[in-house]
Image (cartoon, grey):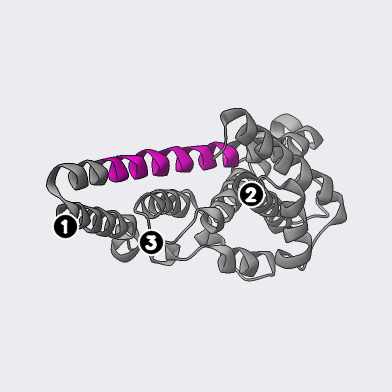
Amino acid sequence: FEFIAFVLPLLIGLATAGAAVCVGQVSETLGEFRTTLVRKLVVEQGFFVGWLAETGLMTCMALVAGFAVYKGAATKTAGSSGIPQLIGLLNGCDLRGEFSWRHMLVKGFGVSLAVASGLAVGPEGPMIFIGSSIGCCLSRGLILSPWVWKCLGNPPRTVSDDVYMRDYTSIGAACGIAAAFRAPIAGTLFIVEEAASHFRKDMLRNIFMGGLASLEVILVSGGA
């Protein structure tokens, strides 16, 4: 169990950085397509046609980005940055249903299109939520799995399952900050000072190591 407890922060950091790279690549590709098309139309058919194309593309991308929020029955709460839900969960509110793979995918899809549309938005807040969702889902799938207990040993029974979920959700949020801002120390301090009122000091190392793993992937891949 100590082995998986040490490795899981690194896995969360790698997965969060991978999600950040995907969001960055998708938004950059779509945004480049939009600007290239508009420039071509401005040169060939005039400013007014280019302006119409730019306005139409921005509107379509923005509407599609929010489609899963205002049409999805289970993802209507995925429209914000996700940071209020994170702070609520880490401070005792039962918001576990907000941190699912479904919400994470909707958030990643929406922020990719929103950034590509040219709106005055950025991926930083949603990346924090995506990282925390990855940490929450992996902790429930691995740390709380009876199969893991059987193969690697039982976790200490003095710590409840919700504490493990809270700790690894914190790690994921810090990894999201490290991926978005390239700042693992800032991610660690965000969890300690701002997000979590209930914090175990022995998790400080794991949070920082997860942020470092996330940063390394961002640096190797060329950035989110």
Query: Mark 1 sits on what residue?
Result: 48
Q: How many marks?
A: 3
Q: Which mark is residue 74?
A: 3
Residue 66 picture location, percent across and down: 33, 60
Query: What residue sits 54% from the left and 40% below the top?
Result: 224
Of the residues shown, which amino acid type is indicated by label 1?
Phe
Residue 181's label in the rendered image is 2
Q: Is residue 74 left or right of residue 182?
A: left
The residue at 43%/62% (across/down) is 120
Label 2: how many Cα within 10 Å (few below 14, some 14–19, many 20+): some
Residue 154 — which label?
Answer: none
Q: Tell me the amino acid under the disc marked 2.
A: Phe
Query: Residue at position x 73%, y 67% from top?
Result: 194
Quarter of the image for residue 35 reads top left
The magenta-colored residue range is: 16-36
Mark 2 and mark 3 lie on one chain; the one further toward the N terminus is: 3
Check disc 1 and report its element: helix, strand or loop: helix
Tell which of 40 and 132 is nearer to you. 40
Q: Most extreme residue toward the right, as rendered? A: 201
| Position of residue 67 measured from the top left corner of the image (x, y, whole percent) | 29, 59
Local crowd size for mark 3, using a 10 Å CA cut-off: few (<14), some (14–19), many (≥20): some
